[in-house]
Image: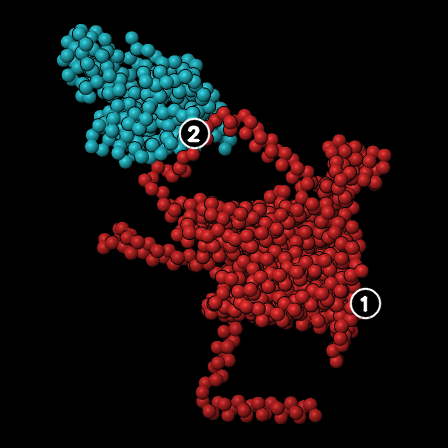
């Protein structure tokens, strides 16, 4: 017992400085392709296994909803080591007016057929490094107390009803956040005979966190965005 | 001027007319006749006992003389009047309820017989506390035992009922035997069968005889009161008895056991040493704990209530034991407080357990099942029954402002006052008893959250519950009467305490009223009425004197005063708590209505089912599941015999099906009665060896007996 206390005191604070300062720790993000002007864009785009890259004239654009940041294009186009990836879809931007969750947000996580990677990253938010409780974010097991429905996975046929019921059971005001490439667009499993094309199958999505899987800080950024405590990073 | 004796004669007349008239009424009119005679008799007897209890008109009347045994007599003092009053209080609503309840037996069993026994039971219960001598007590006691047996086995064509009734009768008669011996010892030493004669002639009894009388009477009356380990008949008799009889059994007949213990050990032969009180205290605490443990895990609504009755009788007995110890140790005021707590709790138990049994019977009648695993969702189909049952459940869980709170709080407080005692051993016993009562109180909440929630909330778990009929007014009104009594007794402890206190003043020679109910209504800053000045100032700043203009009595605050160092030992006021609760509730509701409800739209959605395709009632939380943690924690008490059976696939790696049966044996049966049975069987087996069927051996026995007789004859003459 006493050792446990002293070990804790000796270790000091290990929690990430984000969102007060940027976190530059090694391996904090897998990075992702940025796109831009490159030589022979058509050839590079054709190498993308998920069809996330598209050639536009002399440059290349990245479809964030499909990119799984595999290293296939790493040697060919510039990558960025960022993690503030969360975005608000255009249709949600128009509807959005108020941000009622500035101080506290209770999150119901529903796994709609994910491979386990996104869920594992969501789980990391509870560890001492990311420690989302310090920011007022809490996981809740029941939709009755949830403000935010956090969906992972491509929305399989069998989970559709459960997600619909969970959303209906949440009290207003409520938000939906799609975490991961699958939830954003269906990803590599998406739109098949068992899986749909992501979280927007069952309703409007307020915040999308792309990535396969998105690093915990990206999810944290998404939560802060829902709470209205962070800004979207606009890509040029 | 009508005297209590006239009223008792009138009561007896009503009962006699009722019994005489019932056989000549058409069967379909019998329920109404029963209700009319029963409630009229109840009102008359409440009036009669009220005259004695509140106004102090005691009486003593000689009846006829029995050759060789002396004269029979009736005598009503305040203690007896208290018990008679409770009897009337419970009989009134139960009689009305019976009018709606017994028609369910039409055509199967005789309603006329039921009514006759019902009224006979009423008369015998009323006369037990009014008897003035041993002979008449025994006669009415036996009438009570036998009529209650007849009513419990009313549905006599079921074998289970007959067995339960048989056990009840056997236990009851065993108790009577012990009680008769105790009373005869008293009569032999007192030189009279009359109570007054015993009281005067009993002085100077040796301590061995005193212990014998105490143990025999405690055992004998303990059977009726349902004390551990003599309570095995209770959980079996209740589920088989008709619902209104269950309410009487728990609400009235159990009290008679307490009455007997009090009459013998406080009135006829007052206990002078600490020992018997300690026995009462410990037995009471064990009874309470064992009762509530079984109540928590039981899924049959009525069996569960039976176990809970055992628990409540345990609490009453614990407080009684505490009072006896305090009295023997010379703390008369503390003893008076403990007795007030005991009898307050007994009254409360009668009221709320009557209510709960009526509720359970209504549920049973309207659905056809008592198993909590098969009920559920009844609040939609029988809202008034649900409301009444909720009040009962809250009272028994000791939640303010209902009556269970006031008495259980007083009981625990009076046990905590054991710090005043000098002996370490007695203190330890009190501490243990207090801890057991605290655990009991906590488990009682669990048990009744389960009983209410599993019966009335959630989904209907079976077709029976789904097709429940609406309860009629005849069933609902009595429950609402008892529910309002629960509230009244809960918020008026400052009026109940003096009444109870007067009943016991003859035995304790001390007043709990002065110690518990300070006269805040009377005390002013100029006339302190014996209260410390800063007290009156503090409390009048708090508003304790409010209401003196429109309320009688001393005040609305219950407070025990200590010495200089510790002026307030404990204090509470359910009346003010109730007012504050109402205010807060009103403010909260009004606030929500004003600021929220009008602006927000209410959206109703289906309940959260975890996202399953279809939520079937069998998927919801069950009563067994709710009490499983308690069952696991107290496994050493329940000690279930587990039979496990599993079918496996050929390879033996996979189980295809598992069947696990838990079979509980009731603790007193396992600890006491089974060993006794085995001993009796062993003795019988030894004796059976004598009977080997050989003629020669039998001739030998005759020869041996003959020789013994001759030797004895020679020696004597």
Instruction: Indicate the secondary structure of the residue bearing disc 1.
Output: helix
Q: CA distance from mark 2 to mark 1?
A: 76 Å
Q: How is the image coloured?
A: by chain
Q: Residue at x 76, y 58 (%)?
A: B52
Any part of residue B319 in sight = no
In which quadrant of the rendered view does residue A217 lie?
top left
Residue drawn at 52 percent across, 76 percent down: B683
Chain B, colour shown: red
Q: Residues within 10 Å of mark 2 (few under 14, many from 20)?
A: some
For the residue pair B16 and A145, the one nearer the viewer reads as: B16
Location of residue B550 with respect to B662 vertically, above or below: above
x, y percentage for residue B199? 78, 66
- The colour one sees for chain A in the rendered image is cyan
Residue mark closest to the camera, 2 vs 1: 2
Q: Which numbered tag is attached to residue B554?
A: none
Taking the spot 41% from the left edge, 30% from the top edge, the residue there is: A170
- Identify the residue at the far right of this view: B526
Q: Secondary structure at mark 2?
A: loop
Write down the residue under mark 1.
B200
Same chain assignment for discs 2 and 1:
no
Q: Quadrant of the C terminus of chain B?
A: bottom right
Which residue is labeled 2 in the image?
A: A171
Say left or right for B303 vs A15. Answer: right
Query: Measured from the top left, where is residue B294 in percent x and y?
Result: 52, 55
Query: Toward the viewer: B214 or A60?
Result: A60
Picture quadrant of residue B576: top right
Viewer-nearest residue: B354 or B11: B11
Residue at 51 percent of width and 91 percent of height? B700
Q: Position of residue B298 (x, y in %)?
A: 49, 54
């Amino acid at each position: 017992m006493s050792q446990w206390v002293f070990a804790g005191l000796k270790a000091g604070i290990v929690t990430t400085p984000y969102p007060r300062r940027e976190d530059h720790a090694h391996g904090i993000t897998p990075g992702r392709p940025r796109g831009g002007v490159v030589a022979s864009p058509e050839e590079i785009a054709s190498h993308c296994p998920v069809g996330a890259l598209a050639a536009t004239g002399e440059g290349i654009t990245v479809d964030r909803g499909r990119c799984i940041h595999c290293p296939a294009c790493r040697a060919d186009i510039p990558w960025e080591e960022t993690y503030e990836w969360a975005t608000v879809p255009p249709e949600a931007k128009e509807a959005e007016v108020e941000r009622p969750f500035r101080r506290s947000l209770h999150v119901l996580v529903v796994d709609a057929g994910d491979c386990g990677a996104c869920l594992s990253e969501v789980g990391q938010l509870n560890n001492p490094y990311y420690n989302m409780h310090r920011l007022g974010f809490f996981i809740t097991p029941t939709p009755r107390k949830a403000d935010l429905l956090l969906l992972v996975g491509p929305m399989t046929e069998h989970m559709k009803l459960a997600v619909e019921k969970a959303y209906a059971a949440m009290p207003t005001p409520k938000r939906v956040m799609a975490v991961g490439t699958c939830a954003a667009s269906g990803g590599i499993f998406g739109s098949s005979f068992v899986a749909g094309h992501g979280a927007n199958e069952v309703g409007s999505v307020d915040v999308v966190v792309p990535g396969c899987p998105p690093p915990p800080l990206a999810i944290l950024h998404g939560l802060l965005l829902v709470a209205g405590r962070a800004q979207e990073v606009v890509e040029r | 001027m009508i005297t209590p004796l006239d009223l008792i004669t009138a009561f007896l007349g009503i009962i006699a007319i009722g019994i005489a008239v019932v056989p000549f009424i058409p069967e379909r009119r019998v329920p109404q006749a029963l209700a009319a005679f029963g409630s009229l008799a109840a009102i008359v007897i409440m009036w009669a006992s009220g005259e004695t209890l509140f106004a102090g008109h005691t009486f003593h009347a000689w009846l006829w003389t029995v050759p060789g045994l002396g004269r029979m007599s009736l005598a009503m003092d305040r203690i007896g009047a208290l018990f008679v009053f409770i009897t009337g209080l419970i009989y009134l609503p139960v009689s009305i309820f019976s009018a709606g309840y017994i028609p369910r037996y039409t055509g199967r069993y005789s309603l006329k017989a039921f009514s006759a026994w019902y009224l006979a039971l009423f008369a015998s219960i009323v006369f037990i506390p009014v008897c003035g001598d041993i002979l008449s007590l025994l006669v009415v006691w036996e009438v009570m035992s036998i009529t209650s047996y007849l009513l419990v086995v009313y549905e006599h064509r079921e074998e289970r009922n007959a067995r339960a009734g048989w056990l009840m009768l056997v236990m009851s008669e065993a108790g009577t035997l012990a009680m008769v011996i105790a009373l005869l010892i008293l009569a032999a030493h007192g030189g009279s069968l009359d109570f007054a004669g015993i009281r005067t002639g009993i002085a100077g009894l040796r301590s061995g005889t005193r212990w014998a009388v105490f143990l025999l009477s405690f055992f004998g009356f303990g059977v009726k009161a349902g004390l551990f380990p003599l309570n095995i008949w209770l959980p079996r008799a209740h589920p088989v008895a008709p619902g209104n009889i269950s309410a009487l059994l728990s609400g009235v007949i159990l009290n008679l056991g307490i009455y007997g213990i009090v009459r013998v050990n406080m009135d006829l032969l007052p206990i002078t040493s600490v020992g018997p009180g300690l026995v009462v205290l410990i037995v009471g605490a064990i009874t309470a704990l064992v009762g509530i443990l079984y109540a928590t895990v039981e899924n049959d609504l009525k069996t569960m209530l039976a176990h809970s009755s055992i628990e409540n009788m345990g609490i009453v007995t614990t407080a009684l034991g505490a009072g006896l110890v305090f009295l023997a140790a010379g703390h008369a005021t503390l003893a008076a407080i403990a007795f007030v707590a005991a009898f307050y709790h007994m009254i409360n138990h009668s009221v709320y357990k009557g209510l709960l049994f009526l509720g359970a019977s209504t549920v049973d009648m309207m659905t056809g099942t008592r198993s909590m695993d098969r009920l559920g969702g009844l609040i939609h189909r029988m809202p008034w029954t649900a409301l009444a049952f909720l009040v009962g459940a809250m009272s028994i869980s000791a939640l303010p402002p209902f009556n269970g709170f006031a008495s259980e709080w007083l009981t625990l407080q009076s046990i905590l006052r054991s710090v005043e005692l000098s002996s370490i051993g007695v203190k330890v016993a009190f501490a243990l008893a207090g801890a057991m009562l605290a655990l009991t109180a906590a488990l009682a909440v669990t048990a009744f959250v389960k009983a209410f929630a599993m019966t009335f909330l959630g989904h209907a778990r079976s077709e029976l519950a789904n097709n429940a009929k609406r309860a009629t007014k005849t069933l609902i009104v009595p429950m609402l009467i008892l529910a309002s009594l629960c509230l009244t007794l809960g918020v008026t402890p400052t009026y109940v305490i003096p009444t109870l206190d007067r009943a016991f003043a003859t035995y304790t020679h001390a007043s709990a009223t002065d110690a518990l109910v300070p006269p805040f209504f009377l005390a002013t800053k100029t006339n302190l009425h014996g209260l410390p000045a800063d007290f009156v100032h503090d409390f009048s700043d708090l508003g304790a004197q409010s209401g003196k203009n429109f309320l009688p009595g001393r005040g609305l605050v219950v407070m025990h005063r200590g010495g200089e160092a510790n002026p307030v030992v404990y204090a509470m006021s359910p009346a003010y708590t109730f007012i504050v609760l109402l205010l807060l509730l009103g403010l909260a509701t009004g606030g929500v209505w004003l600021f929220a409800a009008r602006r927000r739209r209410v959206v109703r959605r289906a309940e959260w089912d975890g996202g399953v395709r279809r939520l079937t009632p069998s998927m919801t939380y069950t009563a067994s599941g709710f009490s499983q943690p308690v069952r696991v924690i107290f496994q050493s008490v329940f000690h279930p015999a587990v039979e496990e059976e599993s079918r496996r696939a050929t390879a033996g790696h996979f189980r295809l099906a598992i069947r696990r049966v838990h079979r509980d044996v009731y603790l007193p049966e396992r600890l006491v009665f089974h060993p006794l049975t085995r001993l009796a069987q062993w003795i019988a087996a030894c004796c059976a060896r004598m009977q080997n069927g050989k003629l020669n051996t039998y001739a030998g026995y005759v020869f041996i007996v003959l020789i013994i007789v001759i030797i004895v004859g020679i020696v004597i003459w």
